[in-house]
Image: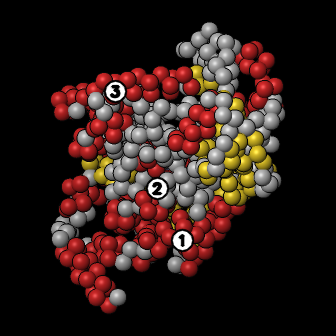
Amino acid sequence: MRISLLVAALLAASSARAQSFPTADPVILRMYRIGMDSSQTPTLAHVLFDSLGPRLQGTPNIKAAQDWLVKLYRSWGIEAREEQYGTWRGWRRGASHIDLVGPRVRTLQGQMVGYSPGTGARDVVREPIILPRFKDSTEFVKWLPQARGRLVMISAALPTCRPQDDWAANATPESKARMDTLMVSTQREWASVRVTAANPGDGASAGVRGSGYSSALGGGELGLRLEQGGAAGIIASRPKLSWTMGGGRTPAQAVAAGNQGGFGGFGGGALNTGWGAMEVFETYNLTTPAIALDCEDYGLVYRLTEAGDRPKLRLNLDAQLLGEQPVFNVLAQLKGGRQPDEYVMLSAHFDSWDGASGATDNGTGTLTMLEAMRILKQVYPNPKRTILVGHWSGEEEGEVGSKAFTEDHPEVLSGLQALFNQDNGTGRIRNIGGGGLLHSPEHINAWLGKLPMEWKARINFAGPGRPAGGGSDDFPFGCLGLPAFGLGAAPWDYGTVTWHTERDTFDKVVFDDLKYNATLTAMLAYLASEDPARIPLDRVDLVTQAATERAAQQRQLDSLRAVDSVAAANLQRQFSGGGRRGGQGTSWPACVKAARKTDPRLK
Ligand SMILES: [Zn+2]
């Protein structure tokens, strides 16, 4: 024990010496020492992810975690409070036991989706039935009595649960081509086809398999309709195995592609490395349970059912629907001494989906801000401007907590100097957005110039950029034209493995990156607080901006295409889709009012 502590201390000392500091500012030097040499992130992560667990909106779990957070801040001498902004449907998750009991026994890898009713913690044994293909919704209604008392399978069974990379590396070209075609056609056959003005369809193929109903995030309208029809349960499957024609990359190509992506997470990482990771979302059913099975076990049950083996599943699900419950944001602050009515905000959502522990979405963003506040309190306890952290809830329900905050706190908006938001996984921060403000570079570049030079060198700051386009909590501030800056992390297979899955757990946290993120964020908050001037709110011209970006993207695509056509095609899709980070729109994004009570998303 003694020896390992000594070694750790030596390593820490040498890592500190390896950095070159452009200023002798004692605050920056002390922040570096505290953040990098005595990080508390492993202990905090253990409590939050292992002991407290997932933080789904409206659950007793998130409330317990919020209470812990407030107590922790107070124990550090930092003012903190919970602020109610509305209500949301409450739910308690108990244990999920899902077993195949005939024609043979196997305990299946699956669990209830969020907010699912249980079986009263009693064993229920039922036979599955596969949702057939319908001509139209009338035919679906005629079929519905057959679903009574059955477990209805509403997702595709994939022909392979191996990732695409594995096929690319090991299959013969002919069998890879066959599998590409089969995977894509299977996914298309089971896609929930949306009828919109742009895609009117003929009515026949609308919804899942022509039923006329969507399955949304785990059940959707189809789940409700099956519940009305007396189904005993809904079985869905959302493996991280989306498949693109001709895909598959070498690890080196995956890294190259990851380095091209702006905010990482979704653009980067290897393709389809899920190996069974599955997304676990939600249902609006009130009596019929909805469960998620992983790729392999969903396929097993499907094949047995299809072959006429009449498999039997035993479900024992414990859950409680609790009705509308109060929901809160947690706010903590270090009051400004000289300019208390001006604010530097740290921002990260605290809530999560609950298939696992929400470790990378957004536990790591949470710990970045929490640890930054700990460092700030020790090194810079009397800031010039007020430093305020927002640990939002309801981000996964449409950023409802942060939206409500912007509506309820005009005094913070009018005094906002800068907001830093982080929400794309555990990786080290390497991009900073400019919020679409013309003069943000003058300030951000000045701050970056005071960081350790090796840190500055790894951060890509590409000028004013554009306002956040939705998908995280910088959006409700960015849409108002305020200085809200996204901190973009290295991807670490966030989009392909951990995002919203049952694999989002403690072991996925990269602590070296996390302690760097917390220390960097503390330094940025300090520098933004001390900045002699406010950032003017003049906006970039998004029409000109879009043209400049298109040209830059084209150059990027051309160079990537030369080395990796698959990565280039993916990047192009990301560019043309606009992504979740603002895209190429030519008008400023419009703000959206906060939902103050449960707002069902069924499509
Ligand atoms: Zn998130």
What is the quadrant of residue 565 in the picture? top left
Q: Estimate the x, y position of residue 355 in percent, counting from the top left.
A: 58, 52
Label 1 beta carbon within 8 A of ligand 1: no
Please name the residue that numbered disc 2 is placed on: 360
Please name the residue that numbered disc 1 is placed on: 47
- The residue lying furthest to the top in this view is 202
How far apart are the two marked residues, 1 and 2, measured between alpha carbons?
15 Å
What is the quadrant of residue 160 in the picture? top left
Q: Estimate the x, y position of residue 417 in percent, counting from the top left.
A: 43, 55
The type of residue carrying mark 1 is Val
Please name the residue that numbered disc 3 is placed on: 175
The type of residue carrying mark 2 is Thr
Labels 3 & 1 near each other (Cβ < 8 A): no
Badge 1 density bin: few <14, some 14–19, many ≥20, Cα 10 Å: some
How far apart are the two marked residues, 2 and 3, measured between alpha carbons?
36 Å
Q: Earlier in the sequence, mark 1 or mark 2?
A: 1
